Amino acid sequence: MPHDGLAVVSQPDGFGLHFFLETDTDDPAECSPRWFPDAARLFNGNGTAPFSAGLVPREEFFAAVRRSDVRRALQTQLKALCQQRAPEARWRWTPPPTDASELRPVELPAYERRDLLRDPAEEKRLEKELLGDAQKPSQTTGSASRQ
């Protein structure tokens, strides 16, 4: 089962970084990595309960993706993600940026009207309509309601 994250221990004490893995399927015929150089800080990476929080400096991201073992792991995970998300698409590996000068802003697809939230007042009205009687307080009081 492919994962959308990859933890890499980069320091002897179990600290490291947690890559967020994303695929680019804008072209239905092709699937490739979409690089986000803002990785999370990995804690307790050598322990039984690793977790991540905060961000690592980008230079640490660049140093990690320069490692051949990390690149192989990234390629394996991203290829598996592409096969899961776009099984008919051709896989195309694009290497991660290894320097700030190689960064390009990620152009995410534009929001469509169906992606946008409704007016909050309309949302509240629909919520009340949906819940109906479930929102009215119970008329049962006293010991009969406690059993």
Image (cartoon, helix red, strand yellow):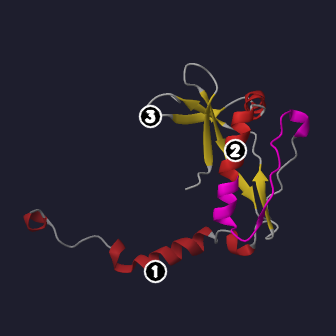
Q: Secondary structure at mark 1?
A: helix
Residue at position x 62%, y 51% in the image? 4
Q: Is residue 98 shown in magenta?
A: yes
Identify residue type, mark 3.
Ala
Question: Could you tell me residue 136's position as x and y percent?
Answer: 32, 73
Residue at position x 55%, y 56% in the image? 1
Q: Secondary structure at mark 2?
A: helix
Residue at position x 86%, y 34% in the image? 100
Q: Secondary structure at mark 3?
A: loop
Report, in whole angstroms, how far the alpha carbon at label 1 lies from the one at label 3. 44 Å
N-term-proximal mark, 1 vs 2: 2
Question: Could you tell me residue 103's position as x and y percent?
Answer: 87, 41
Pointer 3 local density, CA inside 10 Å: few below 14, some 14–19, many at least 20 = few
Q: Which residues are magenta?
A: 79-102
Q: Nearer the viewer, residue 28 or 51?
A: 28
**Which of pointers 1 and 2 indicates the residue nearer the eye?**
2
Query: What residue would you read off at disc 2?
Result: 74
Name which quarter of the figure residue 42 lies in. Answer: top right
Query: What residue would you read off at disc 3?
Result: 49
Report, in whole angstroms, how far the alpha carbon at label 1 lies from the one at label 2. 48 Å
Q: Are marks 3 and 2 in contact (CB under 8 Å)?
A: no
